[in-house]
Image (spheres, rainbow, N blue to C red):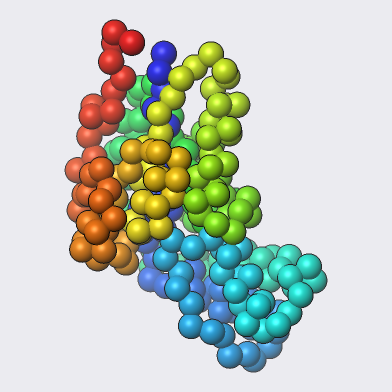
């Protein structure tokens, strides 16, 4: 049986928060370094580790001694901040995950710049962490395209070599579309994050939705004759 692996981004795709991620990064830096001036950072589509490495480069600090401390402080802050009410599970997410769960050929996974721990904090709070069967996370690589490349052997290992599969990457930023292209994946873009419709359209995703309520699983069902 051919399987279809749905690889979801998290922020802006499954859940949305009012700046909790950025606030947690700022607080973690304060916890480790005290009062410092942070550089202006582009967060969308980035990996957590990429963001922290950029901060350490800006501060001219050695990653070997500071990166683990910074990430630990970030997880503590994220856990506290994510308990606040200002986050939401995006429209259509729960219904789509339930629909995927009803079909043997459909497998839900994560392809995210969040660390595994950060992803778990966010998605446990959202009540959907246990919906995902596999994942590649921010600590696996600083570059999102490489994260996508790492997903392919992980899926092969998960399924066993006798099963064929296709991937569908689902995300809210141009970076999600680029990483899907890096593995020749079908890609669905959603407008529930910070990226504008125009900026997503310019990257030519296979499908572009207002939100995941428009996502029909039937579109991806493998042919019975395969
Ligand atoms: Mg995102």
Give the residue at the far right of this rendering: 65
Where, by quadrant of the figure, is residue 121 drawn? bottom right
Q: Tell me, yes or no, if residue 101 can be seen here.
A: no
Give the x, y percent position of residue 203.
Answer: 29, 55
Left or right side of 131 for 213? left
* Vertical side of 215 occupied by 86: above or below: below
Which residue does the image show at 23% across and 44% down from the upper left?
Answer: 207
Query: Along the line of sight, which residue is nearer the eye, 199 or 89?
Result: 199
Left or right side of 175 for 209? left
Identify the image quadrant of the N terminus.
top left
Left or right side of 154 for 195? left
Which residue does the image show at 73% across and 65% down from the upper left?
Answer: 68
Which residue does the image show at 28% across and 15% down from the upper left?
Answer: 223
Where, by quadrant of the figure, is residue 95 drawn? top left
Q: Tell me, yes or no, if residue 122 can be seen here.
A: yes
Which residue does the image show at 58% across and 33% down from the upper left?
Answer: 154
Give the x, y percent position of residue 129.
Answer: 50, 44
Query: Along the line of sight, which residue is nearer the eye, 74 or 3?
Result: 3
Give the x, y percent position of residue 42.
Answer: 45, 73
Identify the image quadrant of the C terminus.
top left
* Vertical side of 216 occupied by 36: above or below: below
Give the x, y percent position of residue 16.
Answer: 37, 61
Query: Along the line of sight, which residue is nearer the eye, 54 or 113?
Result: 54
């Amino acid at each position: 049986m051919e399987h279809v692996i749905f690889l979801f981004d998290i922020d802006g795709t499954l859940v949305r928060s009012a700046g909790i991620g950025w606030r947690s990064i700022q607080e973690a830096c304060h916890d480790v370094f005290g009062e410092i001036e942070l550089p202006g950072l582009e967060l969308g589509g980035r990996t957590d580790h990429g963001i922290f490495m950029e901060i350490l480069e800006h501060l001219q600090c050695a990653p070997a001694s500071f990166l683990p401390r910074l990430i630990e402080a970030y997880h503590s802050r994220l856990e506290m901040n994510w308990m606040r009410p200002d986050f939401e599970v995006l429209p259509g997410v729960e219904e789509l995950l339930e629909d995927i769960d009803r079909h043997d050929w459909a497998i839900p996974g994560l392809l995210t710049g969040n660390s595994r721990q950060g992803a778990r904090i966010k998605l446990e709070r959202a009540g959907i962490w246990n919906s995902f069967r596999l994942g590649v996370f921010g600590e696996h690589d600083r570059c999102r395209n490489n994260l996508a490349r790492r997903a392919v052997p992980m899926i092969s290992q998960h399924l066993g070599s006798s099963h064929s599969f296709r991937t569908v990457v689902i995300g809210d930023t141009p970076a999600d579309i680029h990483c899907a292209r890096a593995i020749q994946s079908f890609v669905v873009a959603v407008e529930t994050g910070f990226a504008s419709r125009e900026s997503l359209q310019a990257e030519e995703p296979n499908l572009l939705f207002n939100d995941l309520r428009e996502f029909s699983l039937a579109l991806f069902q493998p042919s019975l004759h395969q």
